[in-house]
Image (cartoon, rainbow, N blue to C red):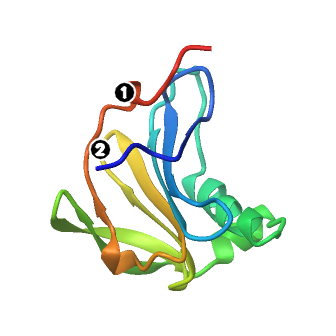
Amino acid sequence: MSKPTWVAQHDELPSHVVLGHGDPESRWAKVGVLLRESNHPGASVDVVDTLAGMHGAEEGLHLTLEQTHGMKWADVDLAVEGVPRRFRMIGDEQHWLAYREDEETWLFVHARGIPPRSIDLVRVDPRDYLTDG
């Protein structure tokens, strides 16, 4: 497995880490993990708004909260460690975003030019990819 092309960290805490593969100008996939319980007291995340907003931003759209919650999400199976797992997905074969809610995290994949059926996610330690400063 090759190292990611880019890495993003949402904040100074390891609560939201995204590993990206591919060419940001053409075919790419971003795989992210977002902790459901943040270390910020009283903080909460609207995962549908956050992820639909990411999808819309790639299309140059500025979506309202009502629009993100009005989007039609479909069920799709993506492989996780070789085992099909149920995700919720928006988009089409060319540009899609899918997420699943686990006990402690939201796992998401955001892709352009890569079919969902070709994805097989594997667990990695994000500390291997994050750098100080």
Instruction: In the rendered structure, find residue 103 and report the number of the disc placed on it.
Output: 2
The residues tagged by marks 1 and 2 sit, at their Cα atoms, a distance apart of 24 Å
Furthest-left residue in this view: 83
Position above or below: 74 against 102: below
Residue 68, numbered label: none
- Can residue 76 be seen in this snapshot? no
Q: Position of residue 123 (x, y in %)?
A: 26, 44
Q: Residue at x 59, y 26 (%)?
A: 42
Tell me if 47 is positioned left or right of 37 in this view. Answer: right
Left or right of residue 126, residue 120 in this image = left
Q: Residues within 10 Å of mark 1 (few under 14, many from 20)?
A: few
What residue appears at the point 52 percent right and 68 percent down from the top-left corner? 111
Q: Looking at this view, name the residue that lies furthest to the bottom.
A: 93
Q: Amino acid at mark 2?
A: Glu
Closer to us: 52 or 118? 118
Residue 68 visible in rendering: yes
Q: Which mark is residue 128?
A: 1
114 and 9: which is toward the camera: 114
Q: Earlier in the sequence, mark 1 or mark 2?
A: 2
- Which residue appears at 15% of the width and 65% of the height? 83
| Secondary structure category for the residue under label 1 | helix
Task: From the top left corner, tell me how far across and down residue 44 is, in percent.
Answer: 58, 37
